[in-house]
Image (spheres, grey):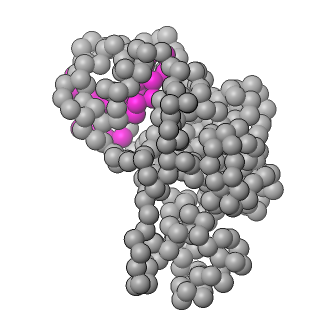
């Protein structure tokens, strides 16, 4: 579904005019899950990609020259760890445009690189996603200011209207709702009604735009059915998760161990930035007795899946 993002509080494009070309969630039955949201510059042309919030750069991939659907599917990208332990990624940037380095502290709005189409990409755009170190979550609420990357949000209060805020608290991802002759829309911004639906549905994700929210089909699968007005959603019972529950309050820390870590555990430490990059990473992994090729393959599998 394509639509112009409105009431964005935390921008990821320097133009501050983000237009969504593909939502978070399952694309189609024949496609893999889409872990983020695809955005283009609605002002026309391309623009710089900027950090959504303060944080530290923990991973940088640069040097991917163009289209690659086998190995470097994410293209050139940056991964940032934020104050509350959440991570954000910015994919498919132009080769050689990345301006930051691993370990660098950045502020919200810091330029990261330039919008491109490297990796497994068809057309210039930014793929933006958010995760807690293990599981991906819907990034839209973070862009709209309904969720935060900071531990203390008292000084960064959500400025959306009070009605939307109260609804967000109830209509979270996975909540079962009863709809009675509710108007169904193809996007959050269109005024053309696609259908009228009645029955039990689930909240696809809790990003509210124009007082509309996305719903999914019964049984809570991840295919987005469409958008309905929040006022038409009647909560029928307690939330039933259709995905992963995430604790945004802390970073998952590996337990101290004297035993050799698994390849996946080491790969997660690499992604976190513990081993640096390039030759430095290879030397450190080899010195600790790990197979660099296997670890790097696992890193690619985690980051580019």
Of residues 212 and 283, the one nearer the viewer is: 283
Of residues 71 and 103, the one nearer the viewer is: 103
- The picture places residue 133, in percent across and down from the top left corner, at 47, 56
- The picture places residue 172, in percent across and down from the top left corner, at 34, 32
Q: Say left or right for 245 vs 146.
A: left
Q: Residue at 70% of width from left, 28% of height from top?
A: 16
Q: Say left or right for 246 vs 10.
A: left
Q: Say left or right for 58 vs 45.
A: left
| Viewer can see residue 32 | no
Above or below residue 87? Residue 282 is below
Of residues 16 and 19, the one nearer the viewer is: 16
- Dominant secondary structure of the magenta stretch? strand
The stretch drawn in magenta includes residue 217: yes
Above or below residue 32? Residue 102 is below
**What's drawn in magenta, residue-wise?**
199-222
- The picture places residue 301, in percent across and down from the top left corner, at 52, 65
Q: Total marks drawn?
A: 0
The stretch drawn in magenta includes residue 285: no
Above or below residue 248? Residue 264 is below
| Viewer can see residue 29 | yes
Residue 237 position by quadrant: top left
Q: Residue at 66% of width from left, 70% of height from top?
A: 276
Q: Residue at 43% of width from left, 52% of height from top?
A: 250
Q: Residue at 68% of width from left, 26% of height from top?
A: 17
- The picture places residue 32, in percent across and down from the top left corner, at 45, 51
């Amino acid at each position: 579904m394509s639509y112009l993002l409105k009431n964005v509080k935390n921008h990821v494009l320097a133009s501050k005019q983000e237009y969504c070309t593909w939502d978070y969630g399952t694309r189609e039955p024949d496609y893999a899950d889409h872990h983020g949201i695809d955005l283009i510059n609605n002002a026309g042309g391309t623009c710089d990609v900027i950090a959504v919030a303060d944080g530290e750069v923990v991973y940088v991939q640069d040097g991917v020259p163009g289209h690659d659907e086998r190995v470097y599917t994410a293209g050139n990208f940056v991964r940032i760890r934020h104050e509350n332990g959440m991570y954000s990624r910015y994919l498919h940037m132009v080769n050689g445009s990345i301006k930051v380095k691993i370990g660098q502290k950045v502020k919200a709005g810091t330029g990261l690189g330039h919008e491109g189409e490297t990796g497994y990409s068809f057309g210039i755009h930014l793929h933006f996603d958010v995760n807690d170190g293990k599981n991906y979550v819907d990034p839209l609420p973070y862009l709209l200011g309904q969720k935060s990357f900071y531990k203390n949000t008292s000084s960064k209060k959500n400025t959306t209207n009070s009605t939307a805020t109260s609804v967000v608290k109830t209509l979270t991802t996975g909540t079962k709702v009863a709809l009675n002759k509710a108007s169904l829309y193809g996007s959050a911004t269109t005024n053309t009604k696609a259908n009228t639906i009645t029955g039990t549905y689930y909240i696809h994700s809790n990003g509210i735009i124009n007082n509309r929210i996305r719903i999914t089909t019964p049984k809570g699968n991840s295919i987005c059915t469409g958008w309905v007005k929040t006022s038409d959603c009647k909560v029928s019972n307690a939330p039933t998760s259709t995905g992963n529950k995430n604790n945004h309050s802390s970073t998952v820390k590996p337990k101290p161990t004297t035993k050799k870590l698994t390849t996946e555990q080491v790969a997660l430490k690499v992604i976190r930035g513990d081993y640096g990059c390039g030759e430095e990473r290879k030397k450190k992994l080899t010195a600790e007795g790990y197979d660099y090729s296997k670890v790097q393959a696992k890193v690619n599998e985690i980051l580019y899946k």
